[in-house]
Amino acid sequence: MAEDNKQAITVGFIGLGRMGRGMASNLCRKGFSLVVYDINSKAVQELVKLGAQGGKSIAEASKDVDVIITMLPNSAIVQEAVTGPDGILAHARAGAIVMDMSTVDPQVTDHLADAAKKKGLSFVDAPVGRLASHADRGESLFMVGAAALDFERVKPLLEAMGSTIHHCGVIGTGTRTKLVNNYLAVVSCQLNAEALTLSQRFGLSLEKTLDVIYGTTATNGQLKIAWPEKVLKGDITPGFTIDLAHKDLTLIMEAANSVKAPMPIGAAAREAYSTARARGFGQNDFSAMLDAWCDVSGTEKARLKS
Ligand code: NAD
């Protein structure tokens, strides 16, 4: 249930998917007034149960609020939601802040910030780190690109949705930092998948292999923290899907190209994700790259015994 003490900042929240529903729920519970919108009306109803006002359009979630948050799948959808003919900029009041928390192309972030400025609005990019389960618990990490004053204005919202907030610098630095972070997170899943598939092909004990790796510098956060709670125990429900990880690697390769930063391992990993999607794994959690690679190699799925 929402707390009684209403917070001063009013919020429009657009995009109530795996991430957005947890984030918006935490804002509701902590007493912020929310107007929410998603093309999926069931997702809107879930938030209405928590005390949010249900919006029927982007326009309804954008007018008469202080901050409009977008948590949408990709660059094209965010761009349409912000600058489209019936989008946020067409309806928000002057002085409001548009805070995009999706993972998008940094050039789209820069473009949206310019468009917002021309309409007398501020823009903040604040993409989200950690897992969907963290978003549900209000324990996300945020990478924020914002002018100093705008950062102070959105900080109470970020504190209500997460536990770690990094002000990375000016507009656009949040999105760019997110791409650097996700490069490692997404590529390391493919590395882990290949290594554990090799272990399976050798006929080694999965438990013993992991015991060894966890004790050396070969380990990584996916393998040690995320995977034991996901694919290794047979839970491949998303989380963060292989489709979204593929989208991020594509964004990363394009953004890296634009600044002439070669990413040869990224290019190979992106095509490994393409292979997983082609084999029907796209809607699984990205830890299921392990299942995809066992499938490619004709090996039994790797699962912990207990
Ligand atoms: P999702 O697909 O679960 O949710 C997206 C939501 O947007 C859906 O509810 C969909 O109905 C809604 N939507 C789509 N088009 C819309 C429109 N035009 N208007 C209103 N609503 C619309 O995705 P997600 O996992 O919540 O991810 C959202 C963003 O956050 C992505 O950019 C993703 O890369 C990023 N992200 C995801 C995770 C994760 O673990 N899932 C973690 C960090 C960042």
Image: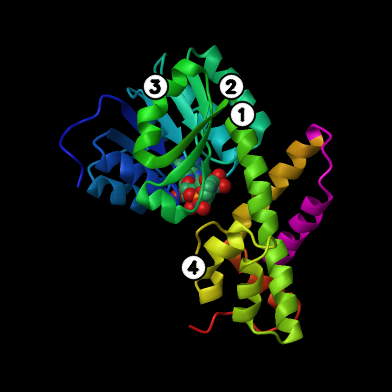
Q: Few, some or many C-alpha atoms within 10 Å of disc 4 (few <14, some 14-19, many ≥20)?
A: some
- Pointer 2: what residue? 170
For marks 4 and 1 on the same chain, the one whose residue lies earlier in the sequence: 1
CA separation in Å, label 1 and label 3? 18 Å
Please name the amino acid that badge 1 sits on: Thr
**Which one is in front, 57 or 256?**
256
**For the residue labelled by badge 1, is the local secondary structure a helix, a strand or a loop?**
helix
Q: Few, some or many C-alpha atoms within 10 Å of disc 1 (few <14, some 14-19, many ≥20)?
A: many
| Above or below, 165 relative to 21 | above
- Verify CB contact (< 8 Å) between mark 4 and mark 2: no
For marks 4 and 3 on the same chain, the one whose residue lies earlier in the sequence: 3
For marks 1 and 3 on the same chain, the one whose residue lies earlier in the sequence: 3
Instruction: Choose top left, top right, bottom left or bottom right for residue 10.
Output: top left
- Residue span colored magenta: 258-278
- Verify CB contact (< 8 Å) between mark 2 and mark 1: yes
Dominant SS of magenta comes to helix
**Which one is in front, 2 or 207?**
207
Relative horizontal placement of residue 243, taking residue 25 as reference (left or right): right
Q: Is residue 205 part of the magenta span, yes or no?
A: no
**For the residue labelled by badge 4, is the local secondary structure a helix, a strand or a loop?**
helix
Please name the amino acid that badge 4 sits on: Glu
- Hey, which residue is sitting farthest front in the picture? 215
CA separation in Å, label 3 and label 2? 15 Å
The residue lying at 51 percent from left, 23 percent from top is: 123
Residue 72's mark? none
- Pointer 1: what residue? 173
- Hey, which residue is sitting farthest bottom in the picture? 203
- Pointer 4: what residue? 229
Task: Locate residue 250, reporting x and y percent.
Answer: 72, 47
- Pointer 3: what residue? 153
Q: Few, some or many C-alpha atoms within 10 Å of disc 2 (few <14, some 14-19, many ≥20)?
A: some
